[in-house]
Amino acid sequence: MDSHLRPSKLEDLESLSKNLREEDAREITAQSGASPKGGLLYSYFMSKPCLTTISRHGHVMSMGGVVPDGQTAGRIWLLGCQAMFDDGIDKRWFLRESKKTLAIMQNKYPVLFNMVDARNEVHVKWIQWLGFTFIKKHLHWGPENRLFYEFVRI
């Protein structure tokens, strides 16, 4: 089996929420006050589209999507598990695929944006690598009053 991307299924939430990267779980709670599973449920049901990456071993690696904000803008997101980084083949595939998927999403939503917890260094670097621009620091964001960076790609 090869690594692949497919529309998310409700059962993907269970798998990912049990194996979510600690940094991603902390980010959900810091931004919204929700549990990791609650944050995933919200994102799953609100996203158009919501996609899941599957490793070459058949495991859920990540889920992501875009929550529409008007006709041409959307709040882009992605949450993953540590296994994404443990297999070099899956990691390289994911990085290549993320640029292709971003281009497709940008065709539907010319303005993509969101916030990222400054402590989530992997996400910050990946967001920069994808070509997003950080436009504002929010020193006291969310219920935990954490430093978050706002980013956008137009």
Image (cartoon, grey):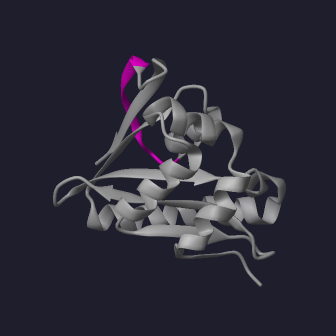
Count of numbered marks = 0
Residue drawn 52% across and 39% down?
28
Quadrant of residue 25 in the image?
top right
Height in image: 17 above or below 144? below
Q: Is residue 137 visible?
A: yes
Residue 26 drawn at (x, y percent): 61, 34
Residue drawn 42% across and 42% down?
132
Residue placed most toward the observer, 28 or 55? 28
Residue 105 drawn at (x, y percent): 37, 64
Quadrant of residue 83 in the image?
bottom right
Q: Which residues are magenta?
A: 130-140
* Quarter of the image where the N terminus is located: bottom right
Majority secondary structure in the magenta region: strand
Magenta span includes 134: yes
The residue furthest bottom is 1
Residue drawn 35% across and 60% down?
46
Residue placed most toward the observer, 152 or 148? 148
Left or right of 68 in this view: 127: right
Q: Is residue 124 visible?
A: no
Left or right of 133 in this view: 121: right
Left or right of 112 in this view: 1: right
Height in image: 108 above or below 144? below
Magenta span includes 45: no
Left or right of 57 in this view: 100: left
